[in-house]
Amino acid sequence: MVTSDPPNNMATRVPFYRDVKILAVIAQMVFVLLVALTIWILGQNLSTNLKTRNLSTSFEFLRRTAGFQIAEGSAFGVPYSSEDSYLKAIAVGLFNTLRVSVLGIVLATILGVVVGVARLSSNWVVNRIALMYVEVFRNTPLLVQLIFWYYAGVLTLPKVKQALEFGGAYLSNQGFFMPWLVQKPDSISFAPVWMLSIILAVATFVILERRCVNLGRNDPAGWIAFGVLLLVLLAGYFTLGQPLELDLPRTTNFGIAGGASLSPEFAALLIGLVVYTASFIAETVRAGIQAVNKGQWEAARAIGMSYSQTLQLIVLPQALRVIIPPLGNQYLNLTKNSSLATAIGFPDMFNVLNTAGNQSGFNLQTMLIALLVYLVLSLTISSFVNLYNRATRLKTR
Amino acid sequence: MVKTKNDPVRWLKENLFSTPWNTVLSIVVVIVVGLFFKNLLEWSFTKARWAVIPANFRLLMVGPYPLEQLWRIWASLIAISLAAGFSWGTSTRERPLARAPFVLLGAIALLALVWQFGNPSGTLVPVACIGLVAGVFIGRAIKTENRVHYYLWTVLFFVCVFLIGFDFGRGGVPSSLWGGLLLTVLLSVVSIVASFPLGVLLAIGRRSKLPVVSGFCIVFIEVVRGVPLIAVLFMAQLFVPFFFPPDFPQLDKVARAIIGMTLFSAAYMAENVRGGLQNVPSGQDEAARAIGLSATQTLFLIVLPQGLRAVIPTIVGQFISLFKDTSLVEIIGLTDLVGIGEAVRNNPDWLGVTREIPITLGVIYFIFTYSMSLAAKNLEQRLKTSN
């Protein structure tokens, strides 16, 4: 809207009913009134309905005993039982949502990048297979895929007694079991060591990369950082007196015990989310790489860079700028889609909230909590994406 | 000797065995994929009980829709093929771009008729074909504008919904009896159509210079986009009745699902439309104001037509994801395609039949979404060249 004030002579003052500023204020007041009126009418209906149905709007119920079991997960490390409060049950759900989302995001990114690069492969078989993968999984509903993975996939695996074994790992219809490093009883905690090792490795990588760029050298920064990681881990392991041991899953009379395990529901949900989201990520990656000008490839090769150097130092940094925003969107979608867990009975946050609402009758409150938590998750992911965008924005002179 | 370009040996060498690494990769991939398809084929020809699909075909298509009322669906499908023929007949002329989706709808209607589930007479396919051909001839004979097609299909949309549910004195078909593919298509079409005006309004509101209006629109759009559809659907099921006066007749589950999906879809529509509006050069706006159009006229006559035209492919894309997302109504207990599939899977007569149904459902969804995404790609290409 263009403010087209006529030339302001003394004689022709704009009358108030044609003054754009006053009109804007009036328009907004009308809008606010309309919205307020609608909300008031709806609110009136809501409150009479709540009164006639004897529903409360307080959140006090969160402290009451939940009284239902949750098949897996804990309240961020604190075990949960049916005697605990609703609040703790919801925390377990949130923990499960975060668990599957974080793992899903990592795996979907890896699979998506592989498929996306495969889409651009000069090898005909590879790029056709990648295309087929993308089209099949992008064009069918996630819910159908989840039902397939759960009822026709994981649940049709052999029983525990005949579980498929792959070098110490077991696949059965009661879940996946694999060997895992665990803390020995009565030993010094290893957690600070692996945290330290990651921090040191990342720091080494960042410093070396910066040095390479400044000095125009090409040191294998990634390998050196990896070496640092291993070194710190090993040094820590031996100085703390070997506090870890390998826990192998073994078959018992009641099933499989020991090691790390994924429940059938978790496994099906994870596979479904990863396979579905990776097909979208693959397209994003392909588009991003194709968006980099062909001249960039040719110029890099012309000054003597190898194929992998070109990809790493020239093409990917430019492609990432295109890839990251839609990638962030896919992460968001994956997190939101994890709520489909309800369909296959995995106790994610939405499922737990729904159960809690149905059981206590406080559906209104539980749905509001669901709204709020998903909003917070979405905003967190999108603000990370925005931060990245700001950091890597094209700097023009 | 110069070899021809189509020489298969050379093609293989260039595309599969150009380097040692590529050779290894090709062989490994071919073996793995070959094993996968061998097992799949072996299973589907020996172990699979595909009989579950024909036995439940009518359920998958229309759900619990009463048999004696099926004529309503046939009538709608014939009307759609007639109109599709009409659009097809005119689309060979100038400006064909807006009609591709209509023709596609007709093709799907014909396909459904060819299967003619639950129709004993078998006379409908020729009738629909005659309708289609007649439509083509009418379309060729009459000079039309694009606008005519929009009106025609809008009217047809209401006619079909009316036909499917309305009481003609012999008892209507309440929406609780709609199911299967019929419900899936109805849910997605009604929601996308209803969300279009709402989405455009939200997009305009978000661009508004009035902070209260734009703030309201931003909050609505961002809240809805930040929440999973399943939460919106549950909320619609639980809370929509609360917002109506106590003596108001209860809305049924389908209507509540449509409300939820429409609100959800409108937020995404608003963002797509906003993208289109932003791409209209500001010179257009200024030029329109300069020749004396009012702000409203500028918006509706200059900016919106150009902006909306550019986002047609995106809207088709949104329709595709909405079409897939309708499957979530299964979780709130509706008998859409997935809901029927789950009911059949839980049917004791078909114990142990687990893979056949999801695979079939996947194929049905794939036919719809893939053909729509091809149409969207085609549209995008034509839009690019026509600009």
Image (tube, rainbow, N blue to C red):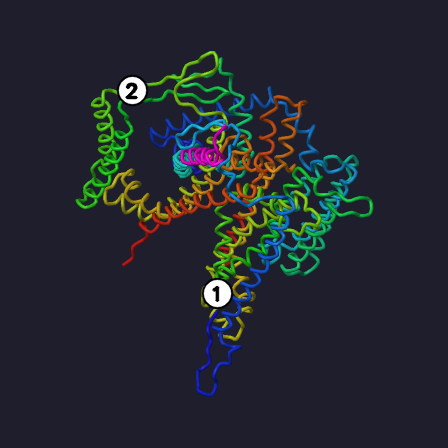
- Mark 2 Cα-neighbour bin, 10 Å: few <14, some 14–19, many ≥20: few
Residue farthest to the right? B169
Left or right of A258? Residue B261 is: right
Residue highlighted by disc 2: A186
Left or right of A166? Residue A353 is: right
Q: Is residue B315 above or below residue A164?
A: below
Q: Chain of mark 1?
A: B
| Location of residue A120 in the rendering, given as x and y in whole percent from the top left corner | 40, 39
Residue type marked 2: Asp
Magenta segment:
A82-103
Residue farthest to the bottom? A11
- Residue A27, which numbered label? none
Residue A312, by quadrant, is top left
Residue highlighted by disc 1: B210
Q: Chain of mark 2?
A: A
Q: In the picture, which quadrant includes the C terminus of chain A?
A: bottom left
A162 or A347, nearer to the observer = A347
Residue type marked 1: Leu
- Residue at image x 51%, y 53%? B220
| Location of residue A197 in the rendering, given as x and y in whole percent from the top left corner | 25, 32
Q: Is residue A353 above or below residue B243?
A: above
- Mark 1 Cα-neighbour bin, 10 Å: few <14, some 14–19, many ≥20: some
Circles 2 and 1 on the same subunit:
no
Q: Is residue A345 above or below residue A321?
A: above
In magenta segment, residue A100: yes
